[in-house]
Image (tube, rainbow, N blue to C red):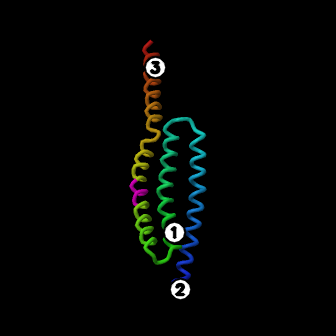
Amino acid sequence: MEEAFILSVAQISSLLTVLVGFVAIFLLVRAAQGLFTGQFKTTLWLGALSFVLTLTGVTAMMFYHFGGESEVAEFLEHVWYAFIFLSLLFSLFESYHLINFGKGFVKIKEFTKKKTAKNKSIKRKR
């Protein structure tokens, strides 16, 4: 009885997670399509790809929980683990990309400060 309840909770939560994941991917793709080409758009596309990898693993998990004890369920378990691992690896790449996001803006701001300070010092000398 208790195992059946736990299985039902796993099935329902995995189904809800997949549905919410599809909505999140749809919204990310729609948001990225509306942007001009640039670093922010690339960041959104990487986020969407990360969601797709994770959602593929979660979808395999959902079918695993609904599949019961069969050879297909064993295969889905391997797919589940593989895609979750791939999504973790890809999230490292995405995090590196996010760390570098905006550094170009900081360099422009620093350049502007240096240029302004240089102009002020030239005006003082006159």
The residue segment tinted magenta is: 85-89
Give residue 63's mark.
1
Above or below, comparing residue 104 to residue 8 in the picture: above
What kind of residue is marked 3?
A: Asn
Judge by depth and name the residue closer to the eye, 73 or 21.
73
Q: Tag 2, which secondary structure?
A: helix
Badge 1 density bin: few <14, some 14–19, many ≥20, Cα 10 Å:
some
Secondary element under disc 3, as helix, strand or loop, is helix
Residue at point 42%, 72% (across, down): 74
| Residue at numbered disc 2 | 2
Up-down relation of residue 32 to residue 71 (above or below) = above
Distance CA(mark 2)–CA(mark 3): 76 Å
Which amino acid type corresponds to the residue marked 1 in the rendered image? Phe
Q: Are marks 2 and 3 in contact (CB under 8 Å)?
A: no
Q: Is residue 43 left or right of residue 16?
A: left
Of all residues shown, which one is farthest toward the front? 71
Principal SS element in the magenta part?
helix
Q: Nearer the viewer, residue 119 or 79?
A: 79
Residue drawn at the location 42% of the way across and 68% of the way down: 75
Tell me the amino acid under the disc marked 2.
Answer: Glu
Q: Which residue is mark 3?
A: 119
The C terminus lies in which quarter of the figure?
A: top left
The Cα–Cα distance between marks 3 and 1, rounded to whole angstroms, is 66 Å
* Residue 31 is inside the magenta segment: no
Disc 2 crowd, CA 10 A, few/some/many (<14, 14-19, 20+): few
Gap between marks 1 and 2 measured at Cα: 21 Å
Element class at badge 1:
helix
* Residue 59, image x, y percentages: 51, 64
